[in-house]
Amino acid sequence: MTLLAGDVGGTKTLLALCEDDGQVLCQQRFASQKHPNLESMVAQFLDSIDGRPRPDRFALGVAGPVASFGTEQYSEITNLSYRISSTSLSARFGFSQVRLVNDFFAVAVAVAAVARGAALPGLTITALNPAAGAVIGAPIAVLGAGTGLGEALIAFHEDQPIILPTEGGHTDFAPHDEIDLALWRRLAQRFPNHISQERLICGSGIVTLYEFFCDKYPAQVSPQVTDELMRAGDRAAVISRHALMRTDQLCELAMARFVILYGAEAGNLALKSLARGGVYLAGGIAAKNLALFQDGIFMDSFVNKGRFAGLLRSIPVYVIACEEIGLFGAAQLGVQLLRDSQRQAQKDGP
């Protein structure tokens, strides 16, 4: 038998056919916005695996909250017009088992394995404060900015990880200084009922920050950057590239503020969970802009919690780079589905 693993995000979706031990046989990347629903991607992927055993189970992480109604799980993707149902997937593709989890639940499954020494293909880990050491068995916080802002927590019971999914990216944005206050007022005009962390700590948030500084310093707006942004499919990538190359001051200001806000929220999550086991930054933005996270601004913001600055200095912070980390976590959940069904079969007897 084989299993299907999936990582469904607002920008991309990864699907992989895996052995029952989670080893990937083949995988494919899809542009989420170019497909009307998840089912169309699954159908296309399954059509491409001729000659291989069709998967019996499907485990997938989805970028949104997962709810249950009886035996059915369903999710509406936060930054897509997708509604995913475990019952519908089973009925259409013949899966005996389908499990949906929040995408950062799947990432946290993989991080828990990495924290215990597992090696993932293509994974790199960079410590932002190498002098700090992780406490084995202590809680771990995981967060990552990409299309949105995902957050999850990991606790341990007798060395076994317990994943706590959250929607922490949608908690309130709190200003810290005059620039943040001006940002808050600007965002309050667009979102009068609620301004979340995710409005700024994500890819579109980088664009929001750049536009804010353009309005603040109009004389410094670069016609070249403006032209690039008009033609770009990923405007945040243009801004971060200029910031990394130090070729545009407003791009540098935008990314510096992004890193400051990211550090503050990572510190919030570390305090709420007492994450002495470490804080892991997943998501593509930190990994692709690592130099901007290593110059001290992120850590200064992370520890800037008054009387608890000393505690936060003792917590290690890591940037993890691995595009398939959520897919790896989903594959491990698929393996667990098989183990659970085997244990149930043994209980039920012949």
Image (cartoon, helix red, strand yellow):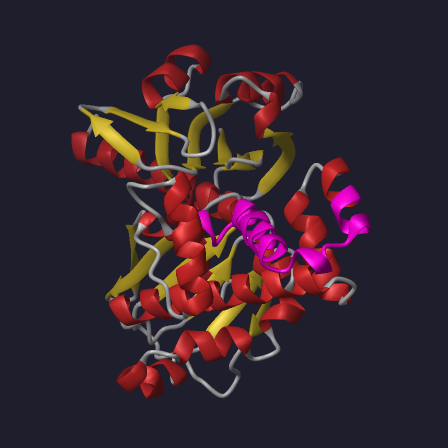
Residue for point 32% across, 52% down: 168
Residue for point 45% across, 56% down: 183
Residue for point 62% across, 65% down: 253
Please state if 31 lies on the left or on the right of 96 as rendered: right
Q: Nearer the viewer, residue 267 or 19?
A: 267
Locate the C terminus and report the quarter of the image it occupies: top left
Please provide the residue range marked out in magenta.
Answer: 199-227
24 versus 219 height, above or below: above
Which quarter of the figure has residue 278? bottom left
Q: Residue furthest front?
A: 219
Q: Nearer the viewer, residue 71 or 335?
A: 71
Please state if 109 lies on the left or on the right of 246 as rendered: left
Image location of residue 35, percent across then percent down: 58, 20
- Specify whether residue 209 is painted magenta: yes
Please state if 163 lies on the left or on the right of 236 as rendered: left
Image location of residue 21, percent across then percent down: 49, 44
Q: Nearer the viewer, residue 314 or 344?
A: 314
